[in-house]
Amino acid sequence: MGKRESGFTLIEIAIVLVIIGLLLGGVLKGQELITGARVRNFIQQQDGVKAAYFGFLDRYRALPGDYPGAVANIANMSTAACGGGNGNGDGSITTTNNENILVWEHLSRSGFINGTYTCAATASSTTSPTNPYGQVLNLIFDATYQSPSGITSTSRHNLQTGTNVPSDILAEVDRKVDDANASTGSFRGSGTAGSCWSTVAGTTFGVWAAAAPTNACAGATLF
């Protein structure tokens, strides 16, 4: 008698393929949920700081970080660094006396943001809030944000997300809160473009690199 060959039946193969499909679907869905959570985190963080900025301005009639009366009017301010805890009151949050780092101590000590931050000469997780990728946020008066092709950015207050953010995450943030373009609107690309968004003049200028994401990108909310 001939030896009987053994193998998988069509039903068994179909079951295996279904299981593989379910596993792959679960992995993709999980990644989608993680991406969605990070996007929501960015949006909530940007909106929260923006609300804190205007709340501080309304209460003290001065900008956080730039407020010259902080030590006298905000409890528990440190006077060891960053201009002794006070800003210079010139109406702009700049790198002078590290006002762009001092801003977080002003906001946290006055109760406008969660956490406690103490200003120092170098930004870190103890001086500044961080994004989901561990990079510090920067609230400053400068012109490092992107503008439309042929237009030079002028200095204005903006909240920078911090670096090391994938371009597809920033693209989704921009799509949800603004116009989905890195060079226009209230949410834009920040710093050097690299491969984070298109720099080709015309209709493609400012388009985020979402289909082929790249890391080390940053965005900014303009005030």
Image (tube, rainbow, N blue to C red):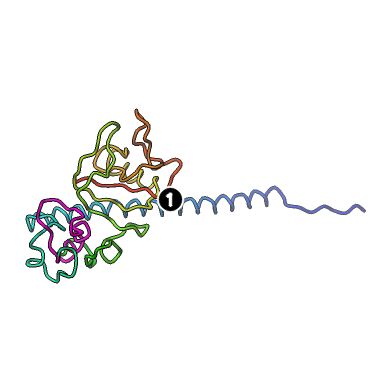
Viewer-proximal residue among 1 and 190: 190
Which image quarter: residue 154? top left
Tell me which residue sits at (13%, 59%) in the image: 87
Q: Which residues are the magenta region?
A: 84-110
- Residue 197 % position (x, y): 37, 39
Viewer-proximal residue among 91 and 182: 91
Residue most toward the top?
A: 202
Quick check: 71 left or right of 203?
Answer: left
Tell me which residue sits at (54%, 51%) in the image: 24
Quick check: 147 left or right of 82?
Answer: right
Tell me which residue sits at (35%, 57%) in the image: 132
Q: For mark 1, does the 10 Å Cα neighbourhood hold few (<14), some (14 to 19), or many (20 or more) residues?
A: few
Q: Assign a secondary structure to mark 1.
A: helix
Q: Name the residue under label 1.
A: 32
**In magenta segment, residue 96:** yes
- Residue 163 % position (x, y): 35, 52
Quick check: 74 left or right of 18?
Answer: left
**In magenta segment, residue 106:** yes
Quick check: 77 left or right of 123?
Answer: left
Viewer-proximal residue among 132 and 201: 201
Which image quarter: residue 187? top left
